[in-house]
Image (tube, rainbow, N blue to C red):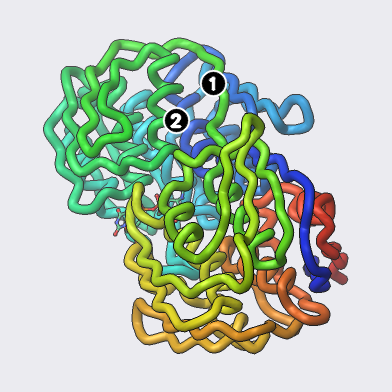
């Protein structure tokens, strides 16, 4: 298994292009199941999660090809005829569950394996299931699979999610596009990836209003047609690389970055002593002067501080002046990076869903273990600021969500290289 070797090398300078959003793309790809006609995605990120979704859609009968070195994904749902999302693929990636709503809407049935536990928490599917049942589906659990049926088609309904789940909102909106009548989805998630999905569905002929607010109204149509859609910028990759010049020093411009995508992060960075400037090309980020100040952070659903940036923020706070508390409210077990950061000299006390972090002057390089996608990158960020070498093991997590991380960081002066596994 490959590892990443980072050697603390001082200030960074230059620019980093930000890719299309992994989480948007993983919801946009299953939208191809809703139509017989071609759906083309531009600005797709080149990641192993995207290849997993490609494999899953192909197994359902969709045509999916990566063009222009993977930046364009050309799909067609013409041949979709298999309602079975097999455990062998679903267990690799939870986002596979996003085929449930579209398959039900298009084929009137779906059998989707439950994704199983994942490192950051239990992550059940009850919100997806309840919402789809309210649209008229009959769903039961057998042999580890959700067996869903809607023989007479789905029917629009008024649905209130018990929690603003991103995936449940995406599944329900996709299913409702082909339901009979109107669906009013309340307590819907408001993440930019949902707004992006709705834009694409609308380009395919869906009748949807209210995306980006907590009430989304969908008027079902008989069929959706083909479309070409550009994937929104990845706000998590953007936020991650915004932290790089803050932790390592220097100034970096994040190409394609927009403040609107990362407002909660900008607010915290501003309070910590970071200068952020919107330019024509993106966002320029640097420390104002002196050491970063400790700031408390609580993860929340959008527009609150994203859980997917919590680990990176913790790495930064490990080097800040003072003590702060990071509170994780979205996932129950998302501090696995804390003990790894402590191996690098960080002072962290975890108690349940909170972590108290007291900054140290300088982290020290160490061999560490990547435990999930965002944890991996937080260790790389910590390595940029550490004295000596940090070897991040088990980087397959990283390849799920960050394209060309070594190239992007080397281009701004970081000393980072991939060490091939045995
Ligand atoms: C998406 C993102 C992930 C991000 C998360 C929260 C994708 C592909 N992934 O994941 O990177 O960290 O949003 O911003 O877009 N829950 C239930 N029952 C359900 C569904 C969810 O209890 O039926 C719980 C989960 O266990 C979790 C919380 O709700 O604790 C948030 O989950 P959700 O918003 O659904 O996240 P995902 O869509 O899985």
Seen from this angle, which residue lies furthest left? 158
Count of numbered labels shown in the rendering: 2
Where is residue 316 shown, x and y percent of the image?
58, 70
Q: Do the residues labelled 2 and 1 touch (CB within 8 Å)?
A: yes
Q: In which quarter of the image is residue 72?
A: top right
Determine the residue positioned at 56% across, 59% down.
274
Residue 169 at least partly seen: yes
Determine the residue positioned at 80% across, 68% down.
10
Is 352 above or below relative to 176?
A: below
Location of mark 2 (residue) = 196
Q: Which of 358 and 372 is in front in this view?
A: 358
* Disc 2, SS: helix
Q: In the image, 244: left or right of 231?
A: right
Chain-order first, disc 2 or disc 1: 2
Q: In the image, 314: left or right of 245?
A: left
Residue 99 at least partly seen: no
- As drawn, the label of residue 343 is none
Assign the N terminus to one quadrant of the image: bottom right
Per the model, the C-alpha gap separating discs 2 and 1 is: 9 Å
Where is residue 299 shown, x and y percent of the image?
37, 62
* Disc 1, SS: strand
Location of mark 1 (residue) = 229
Q: Which of 92 and 309 is in front in this view?
A: 309
- Circle 1 packing at 10 Å, graded few (<14), some (14-19), many (20+), is many
Where is residue 267 shown, x and y percent of the image?
43, 55
Is 179 above or below relative to 162?
A: above
- Circle 2 packing at 10 Å, graded few (<14), some (14-19), many (20+), is many
């Amino acid at each position: 298994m490959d590892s990443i070797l980072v050697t603390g090398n001082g200030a960074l300078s230059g620019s980093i292009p930000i890719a299309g959003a992994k989480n948007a793309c993983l919801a946009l790809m299953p939208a191809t199941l809703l139509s017989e006609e071609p759906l083309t995605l531009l600005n797709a990120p080149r990641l192993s999660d995207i290849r997993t979704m490609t494999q899953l859609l192909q197994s359902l009968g969709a045509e999916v090809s990566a063009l222009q070195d993977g930046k364009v994904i050309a799909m067609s749902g013409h041949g979709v005829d298999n309602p079975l999302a097999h455990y062998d693929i679903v267990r690799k990636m939870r986002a596979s569950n996003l085929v449930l709503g579209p398959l039900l809407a298009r084929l009137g049935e779906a059998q989707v394996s439950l994704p199983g536990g994942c490192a950051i928490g239990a992550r059940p599917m009850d919100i997806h299931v309840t919402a789809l049942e309210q649209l008229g589906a009959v769903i039961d659990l057998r042999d580890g699979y959700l067996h869903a049926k809607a023989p007479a088609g789905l029917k629009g309904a008024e649905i209130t999610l018990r929690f603003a789940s991103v995936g449940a909102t995406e599944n329900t909106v996709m299913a409702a596009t082909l339901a009979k009548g109107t669906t009013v989805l309340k307590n819907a998630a408001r993440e930019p990836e949902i707004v992006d999905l709705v834009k694409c569905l609308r380009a395919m002929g869906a009748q949807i209003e209210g995306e980006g607010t907590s009430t989304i109204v969908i008027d079902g149509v008989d069929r959706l047609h083909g479309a070409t859609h550009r994937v929104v910028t990845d706000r998590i990759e953007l936020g991650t690389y915004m932290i790089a010049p803050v932790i390592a020093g220097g100034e970096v411009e994040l190409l394609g970055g927009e403040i609107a995508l990362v407002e909660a992060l900008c607010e915290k960075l501003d309070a910590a002593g970071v200068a952020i400037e919107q330019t024509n090309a993106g966002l320029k980020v640097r420390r104002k002067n002196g050491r970063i100040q400790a700031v408390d952070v609580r993860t929340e659903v959008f527009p609150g501080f994203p859980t997917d940036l919590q680990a990176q923020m913790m790495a930064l706070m490990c080097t800040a002046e003072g003590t702060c508390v990071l509170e994780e409210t979205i996932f129950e077990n998302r501090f696995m990076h804390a003990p790894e950061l402590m191996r690098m000299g960080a002072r962290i006390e975890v108690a349940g869903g909170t972590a108290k972090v007291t900054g140290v002057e300088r982290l020290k390089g160490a061999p560490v273990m990547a435990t999930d996608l965002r944890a991996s990158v937080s260790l790389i960020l910590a390595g940029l600021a550490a004295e000596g070498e940090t070897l991040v093991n088990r980087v397959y997590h990283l390849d799920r969500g960050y394209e060309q991380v070594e190239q992007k960081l080397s281009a701004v002066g970081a000393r980072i290289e991939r060490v091939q596994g045995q």
